[in-house]
Image: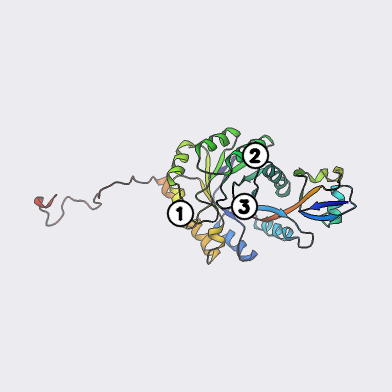
Amino acid sequence: MLDIYGELFKSRLLLGTAQYPSPATLRQAVEASSAEIVTVSLRRESARMRAGQGFWELIEDLGVRVLPNTAGCRTAKEAVATAEMARELFGTPWIKLEVIANDDTLQPELFGLVEAATALVAEGFKVLPYTTEDLSAAEKLAAAGCTVLMPWAAPIGSARGLINRDGLKTLRAYFPETTLIVDAGIGAPSQAAEAMELGYDAVLLNTAVAKSGDPVRMAQAFSRAIEAGRLGFEAGLIEPRDMASPSTPVAGTPFFKIDRVS
Amino acid sequence: MQILVNGEPVATDARTLAELCATLGFAQAKVATAVNGSFVASAKREVTPLAPKDEVEIVAPRQGG
């Protein structure tokens, strides 16, 4: 089971709610994904459009847990104020904490991230920081009280998969007890399965489903890939080796002649 | 007086944040607020006075990744 601050979940897929072709597709994709947690955001509400009110009705109707983010925040101060607004708005102490360094990479700004995480934990938030595979940042976030870390696979929306597989593997080894969720940069179900095979606890993604040709089928594909990857990890993968090793028994091979063995 | 609401200039007579929210039709809406970069809880809107040039944020749930 996926453990998020002591709460247990069967599904190891966390799904974003943005960029779907329609609200109906979003709803069907969430259902097809079996996700129990979806990410949401907050944005300026126009008195005329009131776009947020309708969206909230849809999310409430889905009956899933929401994980609000602080997407777009550039400083710890902005992220803290956004988290505080999100806590009231969504009625949850969970926050996917994002402090963004620059527009091209949307990479986490680790110094601001640690500062904001420290402040929010002190205020009673359950912080899920969007971070990199950097070990020193992870140490500081854990010391601040984060029991969930969410390292990126690749820049948000890039669909490049695990660009630093070794770094993610090392992070997993250093933090065996921490809930680690690969967040961002996943493009294909196989990449999500790869993260799960490394022993990651869950995968958070959005664009790969929402912008696919058929978001509902893709949601299902990710759901199965993540389940398969997890099963593979639990079963214990064999170690790669340089040379071949016959799987069929050698003993009793017909026409066997000892002088053909090199 | 002139203030900024969600980055747009707004002329208002509202004395408090609660009055401003009501004027804009947000009295019953699912929104959260901040003034000059700091969060203001809904219970505190009535006792949060507004001054000229204040920067008010009024936000609502939205799709996110």
Q: Label 1 is placed on what type of residue?
A: Gln
Provide the chain ID for the residue under circle 2. A
- Of badges 1 and 2, the one in the foreground is 2
Relative image position of residue A222 (x, y in whole percent): 50, 57
- Nearer to the camera, A157 or A199: A157
Secondary structure under the numbered disc 1 in the rendered image: helix
Amino acid type, mark 3: Thr
Residue in the picture at 61% in, 66% down: A21
Is disc 3 on the same chain as disc 1?
Answer: yes
Per the model, the C-alpha gap separating discs 1 and 3 is 20 Å
Question: Which residue is denoted by mark 1 in the rendering?
Answer: A191
On the rendered structure, is A253 left or right of A218?
left
Residue at label 3? Answer: A39
Question: Residue type at mark 2?
Answer: Ala
> Which circle's residue, 1 or 2, is located before the other in the chain?
2
Q: Chain of mark 1?
A: A
Q: Which residue is mark 2?
A: A116
Q: In this rendering, does residue A230 appear at all?
A: no
Q: Residue at x 57, y 50 (%)?
A: A106
Q: Is residue A104 visible?
A: yes
Which one is earlier in the sequence, the residue at label 1 or at label 3?
A: 3
Residue A133 at x, y percent in the picture: 50, 42
Q: Nearer the viewer, mark 3 or mark 2?
A: 2
- Mark 2: few, some, or many residues within 10 Å (few <14, many ≥20)? many
Name the residue at 49% across, 60% down: A221
Q: Secondary structure at mark 3?
A: strand
* In this rendering, position of residue A37 left or right of residue A191: right
Residue at mark 3 to residue at mark 2: CA–CA distance: 19 Å
